[in-house]
Image (cartoon, rainbow, N blue to C red):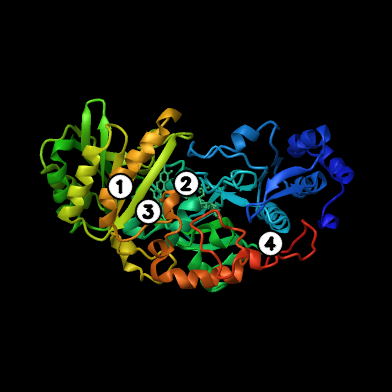
Amino acid sequence: MRRRHFLGATGAAALLAGSGAFARTLAALAAGPGDIAARTLSGGETLLPGAHVAALAAALRGAVILPGTAGYESARKAWNGLFDRRPALIAQCTGAADVVAAVDFAREHALLTAVRGGGHSTSGKSTCEGGLIIDLSPMRAVRVDAATRTARVAGGALLGQLDHETAIHGLATTSGTVSHTGAGGLTLGGGYGRLARRFGLACDNVRAFDLVTADGKALVVTEAAHPDLYWGLRGGGGNFGVVTSFDFRLHEVDPIVLGGILVWPAQRARDLLRFYRDAVATLPDDVNVDVFMAHTPDGPVIGMELCASGRRSAGERVAAQLRTFGKPLVDTIAPIAYVTLQKRVDAQNPHGVFHYGKAGFMRELGDAAIDAAIDSFAAAPPGSIVLSIQLGGGAIGRVAKDATAFTHRDGNFWVVQISNWTDPALTESHIAAARTSWARIDPHTSGKYVNSIAEEDYGKLRVLYGPNLERLIALKDRYDPANLFRLNANVAPSRRADELSLPATPRPVAGRRAT
Ligand code: FAD
């Protein structure tokens, strides 16, 4: 163990005593500064000397939270309640310097490491059993520069915070459809949302990333500086390091858009999906129309959600066209604050819900795919799944498939099957039913999205990354050869981590210089 990189327990305790932020860690260590059992990258066990953990706590402005201390139970929780993991320690980072210290600690102890932005990984990749969570949740600042139309967004910020700050300037950029989702994970994997057809994916709008790499370097990644990483961070997920800040390009968007839903009984689903397919074929980019099928207390329904963020006349025309489908059960389309529409389904996706999702892209919505979707929804136990289609195309599709790591530019329809439940007794049956349902739809898909896959799909790297896979592996070899950042849609380096000796460059945990 490289003890000399860490303060001794006494020195650490003296430092800790002066800072309220470290009180929880100090309490735990004072109670018995024994070694902490932890999980390594290779799945083995290690003992972290208490003095090393104390030194990490002393190096951070944020808190290091340990099992059994106040705050641990809430800090370890993931959005998806299925992933009830107990990490050995949680490093709550307040900025890039904290992240560098945490990454150095993880690497030097070869620790299983998760990085948490908003915590909404549908398959629990931002938490882990027995390892370290590098928790960015204290980093949520959003600063808008209206003159340059740029938003600087900290790595742990939530989409609602981004939308909230940009709207007061009459500006926005693409973000997702549930406001408590993290900007970090969503953007690194791609980033679909109500403005994506107009402005491209969230990742297409990033000008610069502040990145901490596996060797603990703090880089500013732009098209000019580190173009290889700039390519890989736009769709390659969390494979290449921890993004501590994003600079997003903003666009003029009226804070009031035309939006809302139209709902019909699910018996009309086949006709509606064909109608929808035809209607969206000529849709202007500044209009988005998504579809959902769900069970309500009054029975199963199918609906369309409109968001017309540009010219009001274009929105009115599309709304009128959608209404020609027939008299709906519900019609809420009206002028609405964009930030309000962005929260429309927040409550249906609460923190702690048990969630199992299957999803894939379709280039076309053919009759056979429509039939499969309807059959699968009809056959699923009532209330067990919600089916949604988020529309692609527009600006998303005008980017070349190899211009960014995100390759599914022709995935015109992102089809998502969602199962949410709260009773743990239903877990097995819900997952089984969801798999059976999705098996009908899956053959019609043309690729999968790293941000929305179930555990069993993580190994399907060609399906996830297409022809960009080899370039991503080369990037991984260069920036993370030991695969420290593996809890993601993991692009494993070409050499196995156990063939490499983990970097053992002695250095202090604090006082590093940014590059
Ligand atoms: P986390 O769980 O924190 O992280 C997910 C992954 O990203 C992990 O591998 C993590 O290590 C990595 N990561 C996160 N932040 C960073 C960072 N700063 N630096 C390095 N790595 C990081 N996707 C869409 O495209 N459009 C949508 O409209 C949409 N809606 C969604 C709604 C809900 C309710 C949910 C649960 C998901 C939705 N998704 C959507 C999928 C979403 O993009 C992913 O779940 C995404 O990973 C969430 O990001 P996060 O930061 O909250 O997740």
Q: Which mark is residue 438?
A: 1
In this orientation, does residue 333 appear? no
Q: How busy is the neighbourhood of tag 1: few (under 14 within 10 Å), some, or many (20 plus)? A: many
Tell us which disc is closer to us: 1 or 3: 1
Q: Which mark is residue 12?
A: none
Identify residue type, mark 4.
Gly
Report the residue marked by disc 3.
192
Q: Quadrant of residue 492?
A: bottom right
> Residue at the location (29% across, 49% down)?
439
Nearest to the observer: residue 32 or residue 201: 32
> Residue at the location (45% across, 30% down)?
424
Earlier along the polypeptide chain: callout 4 or callout 1? 4
Tell me whether the residue at label 4 lies in contact with that at label 2, contact meaning CB atoms closer than 8 angstroms.
Answer: no
- Measured in 3D between alpha carbons, the distance from the residue under mark 1 to the one under mark 3, in whole angstroms, is 21 Å
In this orientation, does residue 473 appear? yes
Earlier along the polypeptide chain: callout 3 or callout 2? 2
Tell us which disc is closer to us: 4 or 3: 4
Report the residue marked by disc 2.
123
Nearest to the observer: residue 189 or residue 283: 189
- Measured in 3D between alpha carbons, the distance from the residue under mark 4 to the one under mark 3, in whole angstroms, is 30 Å
